Amino acid sequence: MDYINTGEFNSYEDLKEAIIEDEKQAFPDKSDKVIERLVYSWDDLEVEKQASKRKLLEYHDETHIPRVVEEIIENWESQSQQRKFNAILTVAYKKRVLAYFEEFKRQLAEHDAPFNVAMTFSFGGDEDPEPVDPKVVEDMFKNYAAFTGIEFIAGDKKQGPDAYFEDLITRATRGGSGRNPKNIDLVIVADQLLTGYDAQLLNTLYVDRSLELHGLVQAYSRTNRVHGPDKEFGSIINFQYPKMTEEKVDTALKLYGTGGTSSKAIVEPYETAVEQLNIKMEKIKSIMSDPTTWQEIQNDTETKETFLLHFKDAAEQMQLVEQYYQFKWDNDTFGFDEKTWLNYIGAYRNLRTQEGEDSDLPPIPTSLPGKTRLVRTQVIDASHILELMGEQATASNGKQTVDAETLRIVYQQIEELSNLGDYEKAQLLKEFVEAELKPGRVSTEIRFDEAFENWKNGKKRAVIYELSKEWGINSQIFEKSVEAYSNQNPEDIPYIVDLTRTLDFSSATNPMGQNRLEHNMKLTNELPKVIPKIKGKYD
């Protein structure tokens, strides 16, 4: 198990110095010695966590991907044992798979002895929010044909993506190009091949992403198939957050491994995993048969909590099922279609958002995002709906209006956006339509997205000023506090000292206490609840 620093930081001592400076700027009233004593007491793991939290340690694909590729290429011959074995690189997200593939092509073109690289990901269907450009698929097939001699055809049912994936799976089990020039040396994936894929000649898993607990152990176990004395174990090479990743690995092995050098995870057969998914989905259906009716249970605390608990369980199982290389959506096998699953994701997100707790979402399959759905090649989101308004609008007396049919479609898509988990944004769009579009108040001098942003910011400002009156606080300082608030530090209320210092208890129209002290104390507790709701609704 290796943890590689690809140059995002020089040393943990350097990170400590950066954190100290960051802390001094954030809290100028704190003693320098107090700050330094605290930071210097941290171990490397805590330093890494703090640096990540403060965005002092980040991984940017523009610089990170070339470094990872360079590291892999430089050590390829020894790592693959002169290309006897092959490897998987898992990077999460389709766009990163494509970016890595292009970077390998670029660097290997300048290499004396290039090796064979292939990639695979979910090609998706009508529900895929990230449709792949056919030219990308053609280029992928062309690159594959260059070393395999087999040509696949984009869009072809027999010789298209499914046939390509089947050939790749079979070929990848044969080891590296040192055994046969037509073999695959490295496969770049998002989630495919991380569960249930067994290949004795796979000896390395490169990881440039975050993996959690059971999923982490399942992915890591891809390399543990013994192949004689030259492969008694596999290698895992991680390229992000060395200490934080090491902690995750230790935690995962304690929970799911047997400990020691024999630690391994046991994965159920694909059919069993799907059966378990069906059982979990039936439980969800028994609680809420129609996910678009989520509002019926939002005030029923017991039923809502039961649904949230069981959906999270089902979502985790779905994530597991999607990772098997056999995964392919089948309505009959799963017992529900993709649209239904998207709506259940939407129901979960809406109910969590209503609680003001949208940070604890379960792992959602990347091919099925809960906030978007494809319409031909367009995603239904706020931007698409506003774009539709602009495309269909006609000008009259300096104002923009739409006809009844366009208005019907707009309302329909707003409802769809709500069903897919963006209820707050959907309600704002609906209100914007009622207040600005229908009465003909949108000027021809402005785009609809700008008009919506201006209107939305005005609504946010009105809420802030109304609350300022109720609490007797300075509205300008409160607005600055809302703008500066970050969900990454939910308990940290910007400008809290200024807010409480300038509080005018006598002017509060709705005081929370009998005196200034009591009001101030309750206000301090209320702000961490109210500000995230304002940010979540209007930003």
Image (cartoon, rainbow, N blue to C red):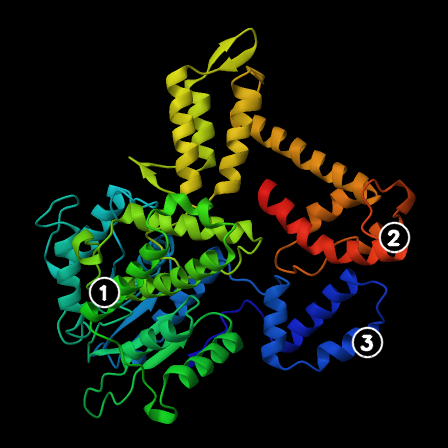
Image side of residue 442 versus residue 172, left or right? right
Is tag 3's residue or tag 1's residue first in the polypeptide sequence?
3
**Residue 231 relative to residue 516: left or right:** left
* Residue at the spot of label 3: 34
* Residue under numbered circle 1: 274
- Residue 41, horizontal then vertical, whole percent: 71, 82
Amino acid, disc 2: Gln
The structure residue drawn at horizontal position 13% and vertical position 62%, both measured from the top left corner, is: 167
Crowding at label 3, few (<14), some or many (≥20) Cα neighbours within 10 Å?
few
C-beta proximity under 8 Å, tags 1 and 2: no
Secondary-structure class at tag 2: loop
Q: Residue 386 at x, y = what percent?
A: 47, 29
Q: Is residue 439 above or below residue 313?
A: above
Viewer-side label of 3, 1: 1
**Quadrant in the picture for residue 86:** bottom left
Q: Which residue type carries mark 3?
A: Val
